[in-house]
Image (cartoon, coloured by chain):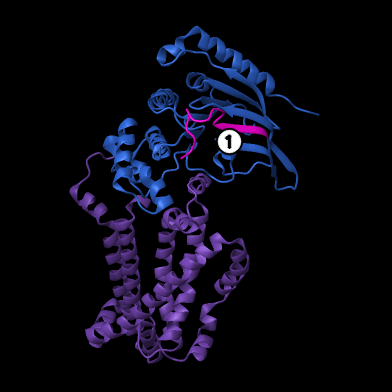
């Protein structure tokens, strides 16, 4: 097994001087990420925030092993990431469910896709996850019969099926309406407090980042760099009263100012 | 407008489509009987029915079965050829570059024009007819299946990669099912093309089948028989189309 927290100390996820470039269609090279340093402790909830094109999603894909770094090192449990690893669960911006499968089959899909079969234990676990996400009555429905928020909950349940240590979330609530977003954030907090995981959460929303995170990584764009890492000392468990906390509002304004002053960085 | 419609008007509106068809048939019949159109130009519906009855159910069955056999065999071969081709084209850019030009060339070739050549090359049996039918029907299947498989959302492919699933599972469990709506659109087009293909093949070389019957009947001025064959062809084509629609609804309701 992998070294779990309580085993050897040190970061769970470590990015060192990570640079990633892409060749664009006109032959020029675009630097998506430049010299990114980032380390996540076990069970830490870290949000990555920044303007469009700052390489937020690229960071996620590097950690997921879906993209190789152009230079620098990406390590998980002190091992270099060369391919996708089993201890990672991913939630994408869109639910990306399979419309031909029932909700239950969507949740167990990773097992069928990876191992070619789904055993009784997987089904039991999927049912438990559907209970946790409040979807137990929808196990036999197709995704099209569910609302956007419910579909994203199925996607979250799917990402948790193999009980990953690390959860990578790429703007998972951005397609949802504001009310559903808040509801989903609280739900994610509850799931996370029940089954602690190391989470990297990419978002556009400062509120969402503050509500959820232990630390917030503020990125700047073109090239994507870590501009600042902000600790969020708000007490846990967080809930509706956190949103009303004056410190919450003050920090939100502070971060907004930082994101905005960095945004128009145009080099002549 | 008028909130309370008369029952007669409601009945007329509900049955507008079959009533219109009946009206056309009645006009057609009247034009032939009283308009002086000779039967070899346009036979009256009643004459067509009479000719059909005279030929007898056994003969019709024989010709119909012959045509359906060729159409369905060609359709089956087209499907069997199209799926592997589509998977190859989607999976390998090299295969796509080398095969696509050939597929477009085959599709751009008037099959009616090369049908006699195929008959000369492959002999006069069932084989050349099936080949001609396949050539006419397979192209939309390849293109639709390949398009459907290539249009899988990038995130679903990433999900597959993140699970380190094999390429074959990526195709069986994600890409092919994702292509189902595209595939059924093409299956519907292809089944009507298969009937056309069978008739074309029978025009070139056959001793039975509805296409052959049309050719034989017109050459001996039995135009009503030709019209009856045509009606049966259209009917079969519609019925086959309906079967595909039903299969789609019954087994792939999620993709409707």
Give the vertical position of B120 relative to A168 (above or below).
below
Total numbered badges shown on the rendered structure: 1
- Residue B95 placement: quadrant: bottom right
Residue visible at 51% across and 87% down?
B116
Q: Which chain is blue?
A: A
Residue visible at 41% across and 57% down?
B180
The boundaries of the magenta stretch are A1-17
Question: Of A144 and B203, which appears nearest the observer?
Answer: A144
Left or right relative to B137: residue A136 = left
Left or right relative to A254: residue A135 = left
Give the vertical position of B166 relative to B48 (above or below).
above
Point out the residue furthest to the left here. Answer: B7
Residue hosting label 1: A78
Q: Which chain is purple?
A: B
At label 1, counting other C-alpha atoms closer than 10 Å, the crowd grade (few under 14, some 14-19, many 20 or more) is some
Question: Of B200 and B68, which appears nearest the observer?
Answer: B68
Residue B240 placement (x, y as % from top left): 33, 69
Residue B173 inside the magenta-drawn segment:
no
Residue A180 placement (x, y as % from top left): 41, 26
């Amino acid at each position: 097994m992998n070294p779990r927290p309580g085993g050897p100390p040190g970061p769970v996820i470590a990015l060192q001087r990570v640079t990633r470039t892409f060749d664009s269609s006109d032959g020029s090279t675009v630097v998506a990420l430049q010299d990114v340093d980032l380390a996540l402790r076990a069970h830490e909830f870290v949000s990555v925030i920044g303007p469009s094109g700052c390489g937020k999603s690229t960071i996620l894909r590097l950690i997921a092993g879906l993209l190789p770094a152009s230079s620098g090192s990406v390590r998980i449990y002190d091992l270099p990431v060369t391919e996708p690893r089993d201890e990672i669960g991913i939630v994408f911006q869109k639910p990306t469910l399979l419309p031909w499968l029932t909700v239950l089959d969507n949740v167990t899909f990773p097992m069928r896709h990876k191992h070619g079969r789904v055993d009784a234990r997987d089904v039991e676990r999927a049912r438990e996850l559907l209970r946790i996400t409040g979807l137990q009555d929808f196990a036999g429905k197709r995704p099209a019969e569910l609302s956007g928020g419910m579909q994203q909950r199925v996607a979250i349940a799917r990402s948790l099926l193999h009980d990953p240590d690390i959860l990578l979330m790429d703007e998972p609530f951005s397609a949802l309406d504001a009310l559903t977003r808040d509801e989903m954030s609280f739900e994610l907090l509850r799931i996370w407090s029940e089954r602690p995981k190391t989470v990297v959460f990419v978002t556009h929303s400062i509120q969402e980042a503050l509500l959820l995170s232990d630390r917030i990584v503020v990125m700047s764009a073109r090239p994507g760099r870590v501009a600042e890492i902000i600790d969020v000392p708000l007490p846990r468990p967080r809930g509706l009263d956190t949103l009303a906390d004056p410190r919450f509002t003050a920090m939100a304004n502070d971060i907004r100012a930082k994101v905005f002053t960095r945004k128009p960085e145009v080099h002549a | 407008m008028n909130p309370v419609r008369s029952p007669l008007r409601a009945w007329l509106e509900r049955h507008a489509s079959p009533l219109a068809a009946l009206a056309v048939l009645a006009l057609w019949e009247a034009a032939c009987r009283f308009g002086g159109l000779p039967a070899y130009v346009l036979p009256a519906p009643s004459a067509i029915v009479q000719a059909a009855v005279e030929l007898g159910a056994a003969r019709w069955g024989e010709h119909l079965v012959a045509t359906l056999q060729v159409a369905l065999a060609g359709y089956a071969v087209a499907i069997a050829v199209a799926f592997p081709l589509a998977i190859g084209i989607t999976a390998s850019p090299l295969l796509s570059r080398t095969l696509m030009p050939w597929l477009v060339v085959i599709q751009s070739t008037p099959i009616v024009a090369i049908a006699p050549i195929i008959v000369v090359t492959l002999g006069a049996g069932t084989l050349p007819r099936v080949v001609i039918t396949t050539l006419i029907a397979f192209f939309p299947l390849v293109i639709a299946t390949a398009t459907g498989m290539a249009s899988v959302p990038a995130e679903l492919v990433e999900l597959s990669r993140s699970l380190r699933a094999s390429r074959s599972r990526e195709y069986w469990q994600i890409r092919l099912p994702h292509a189902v709506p595209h595939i059924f659109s093409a299956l519907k087009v292809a089944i009507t093309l298969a009937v056309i293909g069978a008739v074309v093949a029978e025009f070139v070389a056959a001793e039975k089948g509805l296409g052959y019957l049309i050719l034989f009947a017109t050459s001996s001025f039995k135009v009503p028989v030709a019209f009856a064959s045509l009606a049966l062809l259209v009917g079969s084509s519609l019925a086959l189309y309906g079967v595909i629609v039903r299969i789609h609804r019954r087994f792939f309701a999620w993709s409707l």
